[in-house]
Image: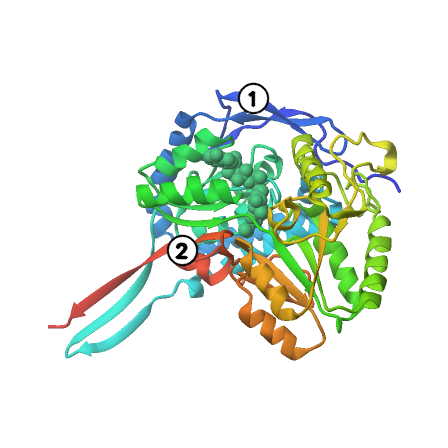
C-alpha cells in the first residue's frame, strides 16, 4: 500500500514558545530521528535554565489579566483551539507517526483523545462554579471560590507526545492559570505544532509556553519558586524519586502518573474470540509502549485443552501482525521509539530465556514491510511458563512482549497482580458477573478493565493509578484536573 504523505518535510531546529514568541535556544541541539526510516526529521534544543526562567517570567506576567478574564471568555479561546485542532487533525496525527513510530490509526486515536480534553475544558464556566451557603450562623454566609494559583509546569513522556500534555494544559488554562510545557525531547514536534495552533487561536502571550529540553528544565521547574504545581507523566523512578520527592520538599502540588506492569486475567468462561482480539491491541498496540499495555496474560484454571487451543489462536494471530512504517495504513505495528529502547527490550527477552520461561514466539528478528531498516523494529514476542517473580513477569518492559502465566483460580490471579508493585491497569475477561465483581472489588489497580483491554479513560474521567503507578491525590483529566488547578478560597461574611 502507498505511504501517506509525510507531514514533516524538512529538518528544522525547533524553537521554544515563550511569551507568545518563537525563541531560539542557546542550548545544545540534538537530532530527532524517525524510528521507522532512521532519518533525522527535526533538531531540538536542550534548553538552559535561563530559558526556563524566561518562560516562567512570561507566564507569571500573563497570569493577572488571564485570571481576570471571565471563564466564558477563556472558554472561547478553547473553542477556537478545538476548531483548529479538527482542521489540522490529519497533519498532527501524521507528525506523531513520524516522530514516534506508532501507526497512523494509533496516532489518530491519540489526536482524538487529546481534543476530547479540550472539549471537556470548554465547559469551564460550569466546571469551576463555586458553592454558597446562606446563614451558616445567624447573619453569616459562607462561600467557596475555586481560585487559580499561577504558573504550572507540565512534564511529558515520549510515548504519547501529543495527548499527554492535553490531559493537563486545557484545564490549567481554562481555570485561569498559565503553563510551561516540557515535551519529551525525543518527540517534540507535535507539541510545537500544538503551540502554533494555540498561537493561531489567539491566546494572550505567556498563557501557554513550551520549553524543550531534558533534566535541566525539569529540575529548574521543580525548584522554581514561581511554579506552584507540576503534572508529570513518565517512569516511576523519575516520577517518584525525582518529581514527587522534590515537589514535597519545595511545597508544590503534584500529580505524578508513572510506570506500570499490567495483568490481563483470562477466565475459562471468557468469549475467546473477543478476548483474543482485545489482547492483540492491548499487548501490541503502540508497540507495547503504553502505560496501559497488557504485559502479563494470566490464564485461569487447569483445563489443558482450553489452554492449548487458546494459546494456539493467540500465537497464530500474533504472528500475522503486519510490521512496518506507520504511514502505510495497512501497518498494524510500528517500531519502538529508538534503538536504545529496542536494546532494553532485547535484554529482557534474553533474561526471560535465562529465567526459564518458554519462548513461544520470538520477535528478535523481524520482517519489516517496505524494506525499512530494522534498527528500531521488533516483532511481537510471547513467553509461556512465565512466573510473577521472574523479571519478565514483574518489571516494566515497555515493549511488545507477552508473558503468559497459569494459575489455579481467580483468587490466585488477583493475588499475583496485587503482589506486583505497580497498580495501573489490570483487566479481566469473563462472562461471569460474579467473577467480574470479585475482580474489580479486590484488584489494587487504578484503572480496571472488564472484557476490555484498557485504554486511556475518556476525558471526563480521571486517569487513575495506584501503588508505584501514581503519586499524588488528584488526577489529570476532567473534574479532578479542575480541582487540581484551583484552590478553594473560602469566604465568610457577616452581614451587619
Ligand atoms: P521518563 O521518566 O524517562 O521521562 C519523562 C519525562 O521526565 C521526560 O520529559 C524526561 O525528559 C524527564 N526526565 C527523565 N529522567 C529524568 C531525571 N532523572 N530527572 C529529571 N527529569 C527527567 O519516561 P519516558 O521513558 O519518557 O516514558 C515512559 C514511562 O512513562 C513508562 O514508565 C510509562 O509507563 C510511563 N507512562 C505513564 C503513564 C500514566 O499515566 N501512568 C502514561 C504514559 C506513560
At a point 58% along the width and 70% down the height, the residue shown is 440
Query: Which residue is tagged 1?
Result: 29
Residue 357 seen in render: yes
Mark 1 lies on a secondary structure that is strand
- On the image, the x and y values in percent for residue 29 come to 56, 21
The N terminus lies in quadrant: top right
- Above or below, 278 against 61 in this view is below
At a point 69% along the width and 47% down the height, the residue shown is 288
Query: Mark 1 and mark 2: span between their CA atoms?
Result: 34 Å
- The outermost residue toward the right is 1
Pick whichever, 313 or 384, lies toward us.
Answer: 384
* Residue 102 image-quadrant placement: top right
Pick whichever, 215 or 25, lies toward us.
Answer: 215
- Above or below, 64 against 430 in this view is above
**Disc 1 crowd, CA 10 A, few/some/many (<14, 14-19, 20+):** some
Name the colour scheme.
rainbow
Query: Which residue is tagged 2?
Result: 484
Ligand 1 placement by image quarter: top right
- Above or below, 325 against 294 in this view is above
- On the image, the x and y values in percent for residue 295 come to 67, 52
**Disc 2 crowd, CA 10 A, few/some/many (<14, 14-19, 20+):** many
The C terminus lies in quadrant: bottom left
- The outermost residue toward the left is 496
Chain-order first, disc 1 or disc 2: 1
- Above or below, 90 against 441 in this view is above
The answer to whether the beta carbon of the residue marked 1 is less than 8 Å from any atom of ligand 1 is no
Residue 20 seen in render: no
Mark 2 lies on a secondary structure that is helix
Amino acid at each position: 500500500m502507498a505511504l501517506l504523505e509525510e507531514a514533516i518535510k524538512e529538518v528544522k531546529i525547533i524553537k521554544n514558545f515563550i511569551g507568545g514568541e518563537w525563541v531560539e535556544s542557546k542550548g545544545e541541539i540534538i537530532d530527532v530521528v524517525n524510528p521507522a526510516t532512521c532519518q533525522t526529521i527535526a533538531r531540538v534544543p536542550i534548553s538552559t535554565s535561563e530559558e526556563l526562567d524566561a518562560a516562567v517570567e512570561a507566564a507569571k506576567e500573563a497570569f493577572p489579566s488571564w485570571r481576570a478574564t471571565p471563564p466564558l471568555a477563556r472558554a472561547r479561546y478553547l473553542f477556537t483551539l478545538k476548531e483548529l485542532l479538527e482542521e489540522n487533525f490529519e497533519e498532527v496525527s501524521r507528525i506523531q507517526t513520524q516522530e514516534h513510530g506508532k501507526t497512523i490509526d494509533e496516532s489518530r486515536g491519540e489526536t482524538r483523545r487529546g481534543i476530547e480534553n479540550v472539549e471537556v475544558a470548554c465547559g469551564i464556566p460550569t466546571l469551576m462554579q463555586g458553592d454558597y451557603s446562606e446563614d451558616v450562623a445567624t447573619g453569616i454566609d459562607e462561600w467557596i471560590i475555586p481560585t487559580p494559583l499561577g504558573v504550572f509546569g507540565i512534564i511529558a513522556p515520549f510515548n504519547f507526545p501529543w495527548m499527554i500534555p492535553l490531559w493537563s494544559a486545557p484545564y490549567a488554562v481554562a481555570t485561569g492559570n498559565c503553563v510551561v510545557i516540557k515535551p519529551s525531547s525525543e518527540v517534540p514536534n507535535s507539541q510545537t505544532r500544538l503551540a502554533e495552533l494555540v498561537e493561531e487561536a489567539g491566546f494572550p502571550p505567556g498563557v501557554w509556553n513550551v520549553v524543550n529540553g531534558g533534566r535541566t528544565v525539569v529540575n529548574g521547574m521543580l525548584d522554581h519558586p514561581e511554579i506552584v504545581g507540576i503534572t508529570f507523566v513518565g517512569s516511576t523512578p523519575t516520577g517518584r524519586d525525582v518529581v514527587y520527592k522534590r515537589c514535597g520538599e519545595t511545597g508544590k502540588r503534584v500529580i505524578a502518573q508513572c510506570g506500570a506492569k499490567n495483568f490481563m486475567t483470562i477466565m475459562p468462561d471468557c468469549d475467546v474470540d473477543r478476548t483474543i482480539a482485545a489482547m492483540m491491541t492491548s499487548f501490541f498496540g503502540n508497540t507495547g509502549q503504553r502505560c496501559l499495555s497488557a504485559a502479563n496474560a494470566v490464564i485461569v484454571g487447569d483445563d489443558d485443552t482450553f489452554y492449548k487451543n487458546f494459546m494456539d489462536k493467540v500465537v497464530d494471530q500474533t504472528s500475522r501482525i503486519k510490521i512496518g512504517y506507520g504511514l502505510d495504513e495497512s501497518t498494524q505495528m510500528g517500531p519502538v521509539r529508538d534503538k536504545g529502547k529496542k536494546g532494553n527490550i532485547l535484554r529482557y527477552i534474553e533474561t526471560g530465556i535465562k529465567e526459564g520461561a518458554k519462548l513461544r514466539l520470538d520477535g528478535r528478528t523481524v520482517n519489516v514491510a517496505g524494506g525499512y531498516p530494522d534498527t528500531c523494529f521488533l516483532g511481537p514476542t510471547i513467553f509461556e511458563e512465565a512466573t510473577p517473580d521472574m523479571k519478565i513477569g514483574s518489571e516494566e518492559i515497555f515493549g511488545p512482549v507477552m508473558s503468559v502465566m497459569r494459575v489455579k483460580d481467580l483468587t490466585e490471579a488477583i493475588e499475583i497482580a496485587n503482589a506486583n508493585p505497580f497498580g495501573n491497569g489490570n483487566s479481566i475477561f469473563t462472562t461471569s458477573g460474579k467473577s467480574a465483581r470479585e475482580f474489580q472489588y479486590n484488584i489494587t489497580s487504578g484503572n480496571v478493565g472488564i472484557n476490555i483491554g484498557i485504554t486511556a479513560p475518556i476525558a471526563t474521567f480521571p486517569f487513575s493509578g495506584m501503588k508505584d503507578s501514581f503519586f499524588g491525590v488528584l488526577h489529570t483529566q476532567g473534574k479532578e484536573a479542575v480541582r487540581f488547578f484551583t484552590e478553594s478560597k473560602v469566604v465568610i461574611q457577616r452581614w451587619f
